Image: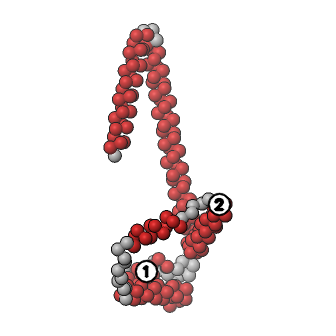
């Protein structure tokens, strides 16, 4: 972890560990050398320290106040009376506009990490599609295998129609029993 030779790779993730005192002494010295040479990381470190100081101050000076006894009821009543729903096209447009603005703010907030987040979502999507494809293939192969087995068993019983009828009845009732057990377990969960 030598930061001094690679100016393109700033150790932004190490700054929080540095503030918390979680780095090894060797890593701490390397990071301090990098901070002396890199103004961007030094500024980031100072911003994180200022944020932690402001957070500590806010938590120390926390005021407690008591809510009225019927506060929840008042909030719920106001929320229910003021909710008009998405009835008109203008309200839908406003809702879409707000969601798009929030999404844009989210993307801007990611800044340089946008590529990393996009790559993570892309990789996750690929993995979901892979698992879905595997599951669909598995279901297809089980169905084909079951039809082949049933066809071969059925061809054995063609000569004797009573045996075929008995087999189909047993299979039908066994399937109904298994289905009823599955449904009863699902309802109890």
**Viewer-nearest of discs 2 and 1:** 2
Reading the image, the residue beneath label 2 is 88
Q: Is residue 173 above or below residue 88?
A: above
Residue located farthest toward the bottom when viewing the structure as drawn:
36
Q: State the residue in front, 16 or 61.
A: 61
Reading the image, the residue beneath label 1 is 16
Quarter residue 19 falls in: bottom left
- Distance from Cα at disc 2 to Cα at disc 1: 48 Å
Q: State the residue in front, 172 or 80.
A: 80
Total residue callouts: 2
Q: Is residue 76 left or right of residue 114?
A: left
Task: Give the residue displayed 40% in from the left and 70% down from the top.
Answer: 72
Quarter residue 18 falls in: bottom left
Q: Position of residue 26 (x, y in %)?
A: 39, 83
Q: Is residue 29 above or below residue 9?
A: below
Task: Give the residue displayed 37% in from the left and 88% down from the top.
Answer: 61
């Amino acid at each position: 972890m030598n930061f001094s030779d690679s100016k393109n790779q700033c150790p932004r993730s190490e700054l929080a560990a540095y503030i918390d005192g979680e780095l090894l002494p060797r890593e701490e010295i390397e990071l301090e050398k990098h901070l002396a040479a890199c103004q961007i990381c030094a500024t980031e470190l100072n911003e994180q320290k200022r944020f932690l100081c402001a957070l500590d101050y806010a938590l120390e000076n926390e005021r407690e106040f008591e809510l009225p006894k019927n506060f929840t009821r008042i909030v719920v009543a106001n929320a229910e009376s003021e909710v008009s729903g998405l009835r008109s096209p203008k309200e839908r447009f406003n809702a879409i506009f707000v969601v798009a603005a929030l999404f844009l703010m989210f993307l801007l907030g990611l800044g340089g990490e946008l590529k990393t987040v996009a790559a993570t979502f892309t990789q996750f999507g690929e993995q979901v599609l892979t698992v879905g494809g595997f599951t669909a293939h598995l279901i297809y192969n089980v169905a084909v295998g079951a039809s082949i087995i049933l066809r071969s068993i059925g061809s054995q019983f063609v000569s004797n129609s009573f045996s075929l009828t008995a087999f189909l009845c047993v299979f039908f009732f066994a399937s109904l029993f298994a289905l009823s057990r599955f449904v009863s377990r699902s309802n109890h969960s």
